[in-house]
Image (spheres, grey):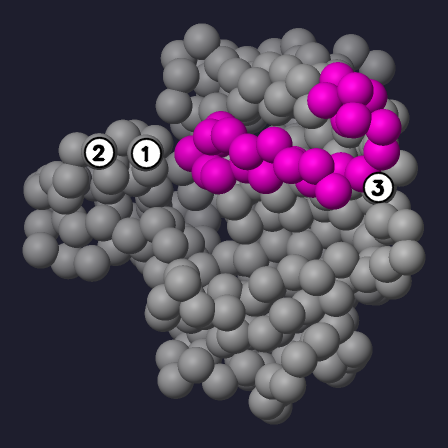
Amino acid sequence: MMYDEFRAMNSHILLGATGEPARVEAGFKAARDFIAASEARFTRFSEDSELSQLNRMSGGWFIASDDLFEVVQLARRLIDLTCGLFDPSIIGALRRVGYDRSMDDIRAGGSRTQAMCEIAPWPSLGFAGLEVKPSLRAIHLPHGVQIDLGGIAKGWIAEQAAGVLAQFASACAVSAGGDLCITGLAEGEEAWPIALEDPRDPERTCAILRVHSGGVATSSITLRRWTQDGRERHHIIDPRTAEPAETDWLSVTVMAPHTSTAEAFAKGVLIAGSEQAQALADREPGVEFIGIKQDGSLWGSRHAKEYLDVTGEIV
């Protein structure tokens, strides 16, 4: 297995692949180039990105690239599947609670105290009113609505990058922070071992998952945190309140056929909490989850134990 590591999308990126070394190296370069180009397209932290251009056209029609149009359409579907708990139109709430720069910039600058904006409560509009014209790749955001495709775009990028790398390798995986896509299996292996990180201690592993293919995504309230006016904040916004989610989970890991699906459901299940988690996961075939609660105990969906490689007490 060969590996390539770098920083992109405010995340640690790890590429892994098996195959002829020269081909794999070429694949790493192709995947790197794709990730860099996609980050530039989808970031909300650059005024030059295509996403920022779309947001500036709020209230008018915008002709999108194939990639942006595809991700927006995907987002619309996943909003419906997660009952609106995954909602890319929470960008206003993210800015209001202090997530107005990239997390790398926030960490580099330390905690920044900000006064709470004197604004009306954020309306949970979601994508209601968004219109598209597929033949033209045209998108119309309702006036005043902007979107942040960060999480779902990262899952989509990881899966697409794995597809790029797979053209040069017999088996490969792309990990982008909490989002992972697996394609193929190394010779003699029956699954990929994936560490389930303890959200209370990143140096500790709670369990090892064994995943054959598809996507894995983790959403956590402990990873991206900062202080605003003396209050601890995190980036998982509950669209129903426009505030950082109050949940009995510390983190949720979802296994699904596609990484973008895993990403959206990881966020939705985390926000929903343990009582509604199974009902939400049941809305999409192939979605399984393992959640870690405040006391460190593991809770899982009906077939979650099938993914465990080591002893783990799943309720």
Whichever of labels 2 and 3 marks the residue nearer the N terminus, that label is 2
Answer left or right for 105 relative to 129: left
Give the residue number, with chain letter if any, for mark 1. Answer: 104
What stretch of residues is rendered in magenta? 1-26
**Kind of residue sitting beneath label 3:** Ala
Q: Nearer the viewer, residue 298 or 98?
A: 298
Q: Secondary structure at mark 3?
A: strand
Residue ID for mark 2: 108
Q: Is residue 168 depicted above or below 311 in this figure? A: above
Q: Position of residue 224 (x, y in %)?
A: 35, 50
Q: Quadrant of residue 10?
A: top left
Instruction: Report how far apart the C-alphas of labels 1 and 2 lie in the structure.
Output: 6 Å
Compare residues 57 and 262 and report the one nearer the observer.
262
Mark 2 to mark 3 CA distance (whole Å): 36 Å
How far across and how far down the image is residue 266, in percent?
A: 59, 59
State yes or no: discs 3 and 1 in contact (Cβ < 8 Å).
no
CB-based contact (under 8 Å), mark 1 and mark 2? yes
Q: Is residue 140 above or below residue 263?
A: above
Q: Is residue 302 above or below residue 83?
A: below
